[in-house]
Image: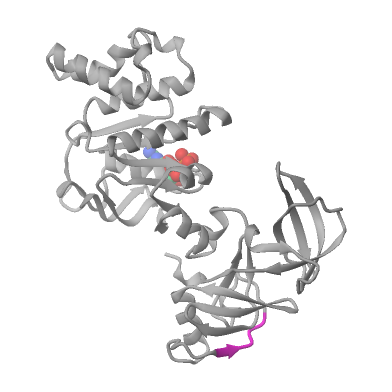
Amino acid sequence: MAVINLHNVTKRFGDYRAVNNVSLDIADGEFVALLGPSGCGKTTLLRLLAGFEEPDDGTISLAGQVVADGQSRRMVAPEDRNLGIVFQSYALWPHMPVARNVGYPLEVRKMSRAERDRRIRDALSIVSLEDYADRSPSELSGGQRQRVALARCLVMEPRAVLLDEPLANLDVHLRETMQDAFLDFHRRTGATMIYVTHDQAEAMAMADRIAVMDRGHIRQMAAPETLYREPSDQMVAGFVGAGAVLPVGGITLQGGGRCAVRLGDASITARISQAACAAFSQNNGHGPANGNSVTVQANPTNLTDAHNNPAGGLGLCLRPEDITVDDTGSLGGRVDDCVYLGGRFRLLVQLDNQQSLPVYSNQRARIGERISLSIRDGWVFSRQEAA
Ligand SMILES: Nc1ncnc2c1ncn2[C@@H]1O[C@H](COP(=O)(O)OP(=O)(O)OP(=O)(O)O)[C@@H](O)[C@H]1O
């Protein structure tokens, strides 16, 4: 059952639509990341859910109950939504020991001492801080403080936990440890979690599904592996994961979701999205792809100008792991850069047609060296899928 629903939600600041006609369903127990570049509207969306902002349009429902309605201006107050919120700043009371910080929301609700103590003990145990109950927040590390903030959410047994860049203040090593702590927290509580971040690695590591946002829109919402393997458009392909997006040359539809694409002098086989397949067929005067092969020679074109692209504004997304350095490979290029990543090297290869590709290699390569590549797989998408 979807526990959180947004239906055509818009939030304006002046004339600017920080959240623009967003619809979203989040299931009970799901871990969803809101991912996108700075200013894309992630925090505004979270604040709308929390009740700190009112939508100008659309509705927000929690467990089937409408808590905000832009048209009727109906709003349920944040404290009545039963949502836990964790900010990057922890927001702990410095003068209270850990246990009291965690239990304070229960004190405010005048819960009995015995029940309060039980919930505090359980919450501290879930975040592995049982032995820190009497410490002051100033005696804790950043990661431990963030775990106290999580425990404080948990004692309220919230409907969902909203997290706004909770790891932004922590160093890289601690961020990784805390990702494990959040995943463990999610497994142990089964809580619905909505996690705002601009860090794609963080979102990929933790979320069941990721909503990629751009200028107030959700461009694509899918499991991390789907976003990575099958990005819906150029923004998602570029923002999620390493790789390159190249203009597409001559295409032959092969049926079964596959096509052959010309890249320089080489021809490679790639997967193709349904929308790209449909756009391609339509733009080239064919009916819907029916499994028969259809060939059109489209010139490689500038993807920023869809009108110039006779293949209908198609892009080819190549991930480094789909490319191998191979003496018999049909694609030639020159090594522009070589960086050791530990265990493997990342090369930047400029193809003979001037396009650049990141490639992983087990061996170091010299800058300027000519190498051959073979490409196992790729993903062709339509720019017209963008919201
Ligand atoms: N209270 C406000 N008044 C005016 N404009 C605002 C307000 N809050 C946010 N905005 C604008 O709305 C847009 C979205 O902001 P938001 O904070 O949601 O982005 P974000 O994706 O969370 O960015 P970041 O990752 O930098 O925190 C931005 O252009 C921001 O300047």
Colouring used for the render: one colour
Q: Position of residue 333 (x, y in %)?
A: 80, 66
Q: Viewer-proximal residue, 353 or 47?
A: 353
Q: Is residue 20 magenta?
A: no
Q: How many marks?
A: 0
Residue shown at 45%/86% (left/top)?
289
Residue shown at 53%/53% (left/top)?
240
Residue shown at 78%/50% (left/top)?
338
Q: Quadrant of the C terminus?
A: bottom left
Q: Residue 342's image quarter? A: top right
Q: Viewer-proximal residue, 10 or 13?
A: 10
Tell me: 203 left or right of 10: right
Tell me: 11 left or right of 61: right
Task: Residue 41: tell me if it is visible.
Answer: no
Q: Position of residue 65 (x, y in %)?
A: 14, 47
The relative height of residue 36 versus residue 170 in the rendered view (above or below) is below
Q: Residue 314's image quarter? A: bottom right
Q: Position of residue 249 (x, y in %)?
A: 65, 79
The relative height of residue 235 versus residue 118 in the rendered view (above or below) is below
Span shown in magenta: 294-299
Tell me: 175 left or right of 339: left
Tell me: 32 left or right of 382: left
Task: Residue 311: tell me if it is visible.
Answer: yes
Splitting the image into four quadrants, where does ligand 1 fall? top left
Residue shown at 76%/60% (left/top)?
349
Q: Position of residue 252 (x, y in %)?
A: 58, 85
Q: Viewer-proximal residue, 345 or 161?
A: 345
